[in-house]
Amino acid sequence: MTISKGPQAFPRVEYLRRLSLVKSEMARRGVEALVVSDQHNITYLTGYTARSAYVPQGLVVSSKEEEPAFILRRMDGPAAIHQCFMNRDKIIPYPEELIAHPELDGYDAVIDHLQAAGFSTRCIGIEQYNLSTLTVEKFRKRLGEARIVDLTKVVAWIRLVKSDLEIEVMREAGAIADAAIARAAEVIRPGVREADACAEIASVLIRGVNGKPGTQLEPITLCATPRTGTCHITWAEDIFRKGSQVNLEVAGSRHGYSTALMRTYSIGAPFDRLQNVHEIQLEGLEASLHAVRPGATCSDVANTFYRAIEKRGLKKESRCGYAQGIGWTEPTASLRDGDLTVLVPNMTFHLMLGNWPDEDFGYVISETVRVTETGVEVLTNSPRKIFEIS
């Protein structure tokens, strides 16, 4: 028996379109083979989302071949056959002997493939940022006659502009995030354990909505009183209490694509400072949304927000957001002062306006947005309010 090809997140022509963009950039730089090691870039180019990146693996994009070759651990080969758009012969499992070997690893299998495919004396690109120093040295030593160049983030920058098919998947993920925010308003109650509330929120993120389940569970960040001045911790071994504030960040996930959303909750009426910060931040959110349009820069959007809240006596030290797509955060453009990346249609960002001015106080609100031909589309639909829990 052999494993069958599973349902594909995108049609074959979509993956070939993405590969064509990568190959064009390779040709511009004189690169004949690119070894993609970033797990999110592998997802982008193949559809593979299984969690095997804790051991070496590599996708080899050849200027000569229509489909890339995926070299990965043998036990993960069936998952690649099932999920990837490529034909079976492009999935090349390496033996278990390379796992925890004192000298060899899966990158030796990737190098073996490059040598067998005739790239030993060619120009080969690697994503150096994702590799250890010893691994980079291994590529240079074993491929001593080849020219090794660093193409870190080349694929990530191509990912920045989404196709319409990708946007639709992110809309689906946004609907899941909205449902999780709504469920949180139902389960956050005095006396309820933070862990129990998060279990309910997670169930929505997995079950999904509209017949579209979440295909993986992204981290849930829940920071409740007295920890609202934190931003990246998870639930505590604690219960919610009357008067507690709760800051929540979730993301719906479909086929590796994340659409994130942040909202603030108050058990009882919000205290004065919280209500005041909410109103100021909401003004800033509206202003920054109006600033999102083709031709504007990331810096323009961020500074619109900063100016709006500073007029009201509030400051935000951190950036206002970041490119979003596969793997939640894409390591390219940031909505921050000085980032001159020009916005074009179908770029997507998490407009992340969380603000933590003090160790014991913070507030969160965000939207995931798409740049349109004329302005902005918000991919999430939750009320922009403090959710007041009675």
Image (tube, helix red, strand yellow):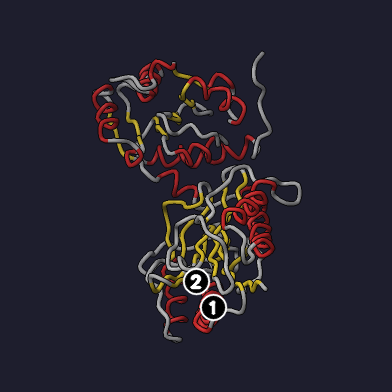
Residue 145 in the figure: left or right of residue 59: left
Mark 2 crowd level (few <14, some 14–19, many ≥20, 10 Å Cα) = many
Residue 101 in the figure: left or right of residue 20: left
Three-letter code for the amino acid on which mark 1 is drawn: His
Q: Are marks 1 and 2 in contact (CB under 8 Å)?
A: yes
> Which residue is the site of mark 1?
278
Residue 157 in the figure: left or right of residue 285: left
Question: Secondary structure beneath disc 2?
Answer: strand
**Residue 19 picture location, percent across and down:** 51, 37
Quarter of the image for the N terminus: give it. Answer: top right
Could you say which quadrant of the image residue 117 lies in?
top left
**Residue 310 picture location, percent across and down:** 42, 82
Quarter of the image for the C terminus: give it. Answer: bottom right
* Residue 41 makes an appearance in the image: yes
Could you say which quadrant of the image residue 10 lies in?
top right
**Residue 70 picture location, percent across and down:** 48, 26
Three-letter code for the amino acid on which mark 2 is drawn: Tyr
> Which residue is the site of mark 2?
363
How many marks on residues? 2
Q: Is 161 located above or below residue 240 in the figure?
A: above
Labels 1 and 2: the sequence-earlier one = 1
Q: How far is the residue under mark 1 from the one under mark 2?
A: 7 Å
* Residue 297 makes an appearance in the image: no
Residue 298 in the figure: left or right of residue 202: left
Q: Residue furthest right?
A: 211
**Residue 165 picture location, percent across and down:** 64, 48
